[in-house]
Structure formats: C-alpha cells, structure tokens
Amino acid sequence: GQQVMQIPQYQHVQEGEDFTTYCNSSTTLSNIQWYKQRPGGHPVFLIQLVKSGEVKKQKRLTFQFGEAKKNSSLHITATQTTDVGTYFCAGGNAGNMLTFGGGTRLMVKP
Amino acid sequence: DAGITQSPRHKVTETGTPVTLRCHQTENHRYMYWYRQDPGHGLRLIHYSYGVKDTDKGEVSDGYSVSRSKTEDFLLTLESATSSQTSVYFCATAGLADVHEQYFGPGTRLTVT
C-alpha cells in the first residue's frame, strides 16, 4: 500500500533559526495536507496542496508540492517558541483517505 | 475547531476485556475516521466511515470493529483488548468541501494491562 515517509524525525533549533521537514510518498498523490500537533494536543489542519509544483505561504511557513506530486516540504523561517510541536504530512488519494507520515517533532530553544 | 468529542478520554483496562470508544460530532460531517497514534508511527488509520452504516477497513484494522448507526456517532470496539492496543486513539471527521481537511477530536488514551 501507499507509504509516506517523513524526515527528520526530530529537530532541535535555536529560536530564530529556520526549520524544514520533508515528506516523500511511494506513490503519486492527488493532494498533500499538513497538520500540526502541539504537545498533548490533537492534530490541526494547516494547509492542502493539490497542483504539481504548488507553493503556498502562511506567514513564516512555506509549503511546497513536488513536480511529480510525490514529495513535499514545509519550511519555517525564523522559528519561534510557539512553533513547537509535531508536524505531519498526509498524502491524499481519491478515496478521501489520508496516509500520514511519521511526523517531525520540532523543539525550539529560546 | 469542529464539535468533536471523544469518550472516555482516559481508560485503563485488562487484557481480554472488551472496550468501546465513542466519537460524537455536531458538524453533520459525512466522513468519520478512527486513528491510533504510537511513537514513531504517526497516525495510522484503523477504520473509516463514509456514511451511516457504511464503513471500511483501514491500514491496521485487525482486532477492531466499528459501527455507525447515526451520522453523529462513530464507535470503535476492541472485542478483546491486548497490550499491543495500548495507544492514543483519535477520531476525525471530514465534510464534502473541496479541501478535504480532517478535524480531529481530543483523543482517548487507552492502556491495556
């Protein structure tokens, strides 16, 4: 079945440094979604990308969908302590189901 | 956040006992999902529903069953709990919008001793 791999598993950064997490799918995706889960919380939807090569920005967050629709990345510029949490990518298919990556846990040192 | 509640929020049970987790939504969303979350595995789909009485298996369905008799309720049952089913269980819902985002409930922490 479809597999979605995400790296790195953990990332420690100093506040103000940039952060990137990468997502790779074993199959071509119809869309990719990104979620954030704060410690002790539940996943919260951030964004969906649908088009090949699509780039979307939300303030300091930049999301990219690869040309082949098999990979994606999330980049955070100048991290803040409020960015702490685990970031998940999730590959979507036509059946309204998502396959989640293992997540990248971001820790920010003030 | 969408109106999704899960009950119980925490449960400790013994191996071999049946356990039912409940997910309740007030958004009238068509799709409902049960995931389990374990360290290093992200979120794995157990079962999902695409309408009342319409359910299907996910990636890790062995040992679990579900039922959906009303739009707002989706039940997950562990017929005979095992220690490998110790996990955090999340329910999620999704509507019919073009952006098929999923809304997650607060989770249930289940410990099987």
Image (spheres, rainbow, N blue to C red):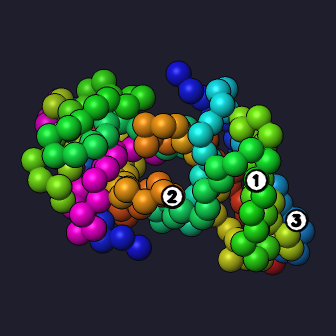
Name the disc covering residue B99, or none: 2
Query: Which of the pair B113/B92 is nearer the observer?
Result: B92
Estimate how packed mark 1 is, as few (under 14), some (14 to 19) or many (20 or more) residues with alpha carbons within 10 Å. Answer: some
Give me the residue at 31% from left, 29% from top: B57
Q: Is residue A13 visible?
A: no
Look at the image and give the residue range highlighted in magenta.
Answer: B16-37
Q: Position of residue A106 (x, y in %)?
A: 72, 60
CB under 8 Å between discs 3 and 2: no
Prevailing secondary structure class for the magenta stretch in the rendered image:
strand
Chain of the residue that carries numbered disc 1 in the rendered image = A
> What residue lies at 68% left-to-right and 68% top-to-bottom?
A84
Q: Which amino acid does label 3 sit on?
A: Asp
Q: Which residue lies furthest to the right in this view?
A: A17
Residue nearer the viewer, B107 or B113: B107
Residue B17 among magenta residues: yes
**Other residues around mark 3 within 10 Å, as few (<14) / some (14–19) / many (≥20):** some
Pair 3/1: label in front: 1
Q: Which numbered mark, 3 or 2, is in the foreground of this view?
A: 2
Residue A75 visible (yes or no): yes
The image position of residue B39, as x and y in percent, is 55, 43
Marks 3 and 2, Cα distance to the nearest angstrom? 28 Å
Residue B30 is left or right of residue A77, and the answer is left
Quadrant where the C terminus of chain A sits is: bottom right
Of residues B28 and B58, the one drawn nearer to the viewer in this rendering: B28
Spatial CA span between label 1 and label 2: 15 Å
Residue A74: image location, x then y, percent: 76, 56
Q: Which amino acid does label 2 sit on?
A: Val
Q: Does the magenta stretch include residue B24?
A: yes
| Residue A54 tag number | 1
Q: Tell me what residue is drawn at x 48 percent, y 57 percent.
A: B98
Q: Mark 2 lies on which chain?
A: B
Q: Which residue, given by chain and number where applicable, does mark 3 sit on? A: A18
